[in-house]
Image (cartoon, rainbow, N blue to C red):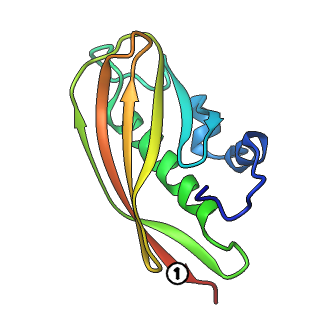
Amino acid sequence: MIWFKKDLQIHEIAELGKGTMSEHIGLAFTELGADYLKAQMPVDARTRQPYGLLHGGASCVLAETLGSVASAMVIDPGRFICVGLEINANHVRGVREGLVTGITRPLHIGGSTHVWDIKIHDEREKLVCISRLTVAILKKT
């Protein structure tokens, strides 16, 4: 188990999205495992680009949200905060409708940085996007 709070529940994570971009685009956390976090996002008018496909930026929002929230669940929130340093994304398949699901797992959990692997799939389990997020861990001031 990688989470700081050993009895962490998915509903506690959902509270973090209130009043944020995640809530605006319909992102919802769906599953929490010992070393992963999942969320879904609709492909609709809020997340499509002009050609009717899932916007790459929306995929990045899903990826960064998953990795950043996962980092926030790993650290001691009384002592640290975490902020994104770098994100990359390879968009490998277009999606026009339905839901996409992202899952993040750690590649590195260090004292000053975390690196997360995020994969986004469509409803047919086809890979849509592969992303990597690096997060800085900062002492609270």
Q: Is residue 140 left or right of residue 92?
A: right
Q: Seen in the image, is 17 located left or right of residue 129? A: right
Rendered location of residue 87, percent (x, y): 32, 54
Q: Is residue 124 above or below residue 26?
A: above
Disc 1 secondary structure class: strand
Q: Is residue 106 left or right of residue 71?
A: left
- Answer with left or right where residue 106 lies relative to residue 5: left
- Image quarter of residue 38: top right
Looking at the image, residue 119 lies above or below residue 50:
below
* Image quarter of the C terminus: bottom right
Counting from the top left corner in percent of width and height, residue 131 is at 31, 44
Q: Quadrant of residue 26?
A: top right
Q: Amino acid at mark 1?
A: Leu
The quarter holding residue 114 reads: bottom left
| Towards the viewer: 125 or 2 | 2
- Asked if residue 15 is positioned above or below residue 128 in the image, the reply reads below
Graded by Cα atoms within 10 Å as few (under 14), some (14 to 19) or many (20 or more), the crowding at tag 1 reads: some
Residue at x 34%, y 28% (from the top left corner)? 55
Q: Residue at x 53, y 26 (%)?
A: 41
- Residue lying furthest bottom: 141
Q: Residue at x 67, y 65 (%)?
A: 4
Q: Identify residue for label 1.
A: 138
Residue 12: give x, y in percent of width and height: 77, 47
State how many labels appear: 1
> Is the N terminus in the top left, top right, bottom left or bottom right quadrant?
bottom right
Task: Indicate the position of residue 126 as horizontal and vertical percent values.
Answer: 32, 17
- Name the residue at 53% across, 69% down: 82
